[in-house]
Image (cartoon, grey):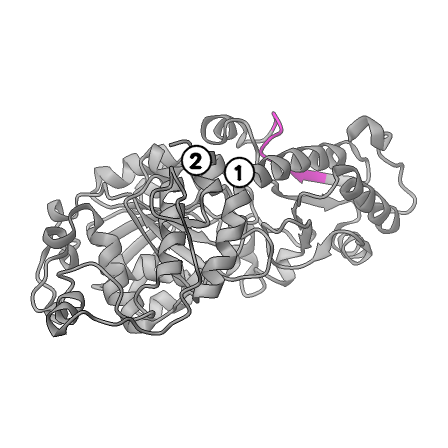
């Protein structure tokens, strides 16, 4: 089924080709069992079904199925936020210790999780020198549990060569985990290029309205866990907490995602509420059409900024001179994402003046809203990083990150134009707005 068709059925249960049954909000804690034996079978993971909303909920299950369909996977698990999804995704692979290998261009909170929190739990994160596949391959060893990247880096805007990453990871017997929040499955499906696990912050483009937090882990079902028992014993050896259950035997290609739900979501409880799942489903219904408008508006705004002499630089992967232009063609079909960065002439102080002068564009740290947003990463989302880490992540002091929304493009450009006039008052203006917009 085409992904655009799947998206419009996101508010329905059952067969996505028919959308026959409307989805109510199952706001309940627990579910009645048919008998003692039925309850035991559910808790022993011998039968499928609902038993307690910390583990699974019918409304969340619809959301899991819809995004899993969009990504082309075999199963998904909803959690309370994108960071919870990332934490569970990594812990499910590395709770026996070891290391993961990551690109340096990361969202700031992800960098903090990797650099400090996971390290205290015995999981070492090795940051590659760059996002080149050779630099990733150089760090993989016998203790590596996965390779990690953001398909489109936030805020760096770099695009990772997913197929090449998958090749170097699989050659050493480890899966590739991809955060696909910025690209969304409308622009890019990492599984089509060899990735094994995808994580999303549903708070962003998939939700689309900046009202509801959520996260999701999606399993491709393709990584051969049983072929790597030494590196990943948790999937192919008996689990004592479930009376010796073996995940690869019980669940087959869904071994990874079912262990994630049964071990991590059940015991640590970063639960997505049914109401939040319902609200995010409303966003999923419009993701295909919204991304078209996001992408087109982003292109027009980037072209305006590049042509304006008051702007020092623009990092936008849709430009032919971008180092990521070829990867934009390969992975995004030439549709650069509406998340990009720029710097104003005059450096940090001019950038702050522009930021403070925005009227239509909101000063928020979120991305992916229907409304346009601006952020100063060095002082907000990436505040905890050292200067060296900031440079490695592609964050400079003057950088402004834009998440372009679905308003009228001319209105967005007009707001930037007036803010630039405040920030760089003596400089020449851009060409006529009509020539750009």
**196 within the magenta span:** no
Residue 243 at x, y percent in the picture: 8, 69
Residue 350 at x, y percent in the picture: 80, 52
Residue 70: quarter of image = top left
Q: Is residue 95 above or below residue 232?
A: below
Residue 11 at x, y percent in the picture: 46, 50
Q: Residue at x 81, y 35 (%)?
A: 309
The span shown in magenta is 313-321
Q: Residue at x 19, y 50 (%)?
A: 142
Look at the image and tell me in which quarter the C terminus lies.
top right
Task: Say which of 21 and 344 sits in front.
Answer: 21
Asked whether the viewer can see residue 198, the reply is: yes
Which of the labelled discs sits on residue 205, or is there none?
none
Q: Is residue 212 above or below residue 325?
A: below
Cβ–Cβ under 8 Å for marks 2 and 1: yes
Task: Identify the element where label 2 is drawn.
Answer: helix
Q: Residue at x 86, y 46 (%)?
A: 418
Residue 189: quarter of image = top left
Q: Is residue 106 above or below residue 326?
A: below
| In-image side of 10 versus 100 (left or right) | right
Residue with the mark numbered 2:
3
Q: Main secondary structure of the magenta part?
A: loop
Mark 1: give few (<14), some (14-19) or many (20+) Cα within 10 Å. Answer: many
Task: Identify the element where label 1 is drawn.
Answer: helix
| In-image side of 181 versus 415 (left or right) | left
């Amino acid at each position: 089924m085409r992904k655009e068709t799947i998206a419009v059925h996101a508010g329905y249960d059952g067969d996505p080709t028919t959308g026959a049954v409307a989805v109510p909000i199952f706001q309940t804690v627990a579910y009645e069992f048919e008998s003692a034996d039925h309850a035991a079978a559910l808790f022993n993971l011998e039968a499928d079904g609902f038993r307690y909303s910390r583990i699974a909920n019918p409304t969340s299950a619809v959301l899991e199925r819809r995004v899993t369909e969009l990504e082309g996977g075999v199963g998904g698990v909803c959690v309370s936020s994108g960071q919870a999804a990332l934490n569970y995704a990594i812990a499910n692979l590395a709770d026996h210790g070891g290391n993961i290998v990551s690109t340096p261009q990361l969202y700031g909170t992800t960098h903090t999780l990797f650099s400090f929190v996971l390290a205290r739990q015995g999981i070492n994160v090795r940051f590659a020198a760059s996002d080149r596949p050779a630099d990733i391959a150089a760090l993989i060893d016998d203790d590596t549990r996965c390779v990690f990247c953001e398909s489109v880096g936030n805020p760096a805007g770099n695009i990772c060569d997913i197929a090449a990453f998958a090749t170097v990871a699989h050659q050493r017997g480890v899966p590739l985990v991809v955060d696909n929040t910025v690209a969304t499955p409308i622009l890019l499906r990492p599984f089509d290029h060899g990735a094994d696990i995808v994580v999303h912050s549903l708070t962003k483009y998939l939700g689309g309205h900046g009202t509801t937090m959520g996260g999701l882990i999606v399993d491709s079902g393709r990584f051969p866990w049983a072929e790597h028992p030494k590196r990943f014993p948790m999937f192919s050896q008996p689990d004592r907490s479930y009376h010796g259950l073996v995940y690869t035997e019980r669940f087959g290609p869904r071994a990874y995602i079912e262990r994630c739900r049964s071990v991590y979501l059940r015991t640590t409880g970063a639960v997505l509420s049914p109401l939040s799942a319902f609200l995010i489903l409303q966003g999923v219904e419009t993701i295909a059409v919204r991304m078209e408008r996001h992408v087109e508006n982003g292109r027009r705004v980037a072209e305006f900024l590049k042509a304006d002499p008051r702007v020092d630089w623009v990092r936008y992967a849709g430009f032919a001179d971008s180092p990521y232009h070829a990867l934009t063609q390969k992975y995004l079909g030439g549709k650069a994402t509406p998340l990009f960065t720029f710097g104003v002439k005059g450096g940090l102080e001019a950038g702050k003046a522009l930021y403070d002068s925005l009227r239509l564009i909101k000063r928020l740290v979120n991305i992916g809203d229907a409304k346009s947003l601006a952020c100063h990463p060095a002082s907000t989302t990436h505040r905890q990083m050292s200067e060296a880490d900031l440079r490695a992540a592609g964050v400079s002091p003057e950088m402004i990150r834009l998440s372009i929304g679905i308003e009228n493009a001319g209105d967005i450009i007009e707001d930037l134009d007036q803010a630039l006039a405040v920030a760089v008052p003596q400089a020449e203006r851009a060409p006529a707005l009509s020539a750009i917009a």
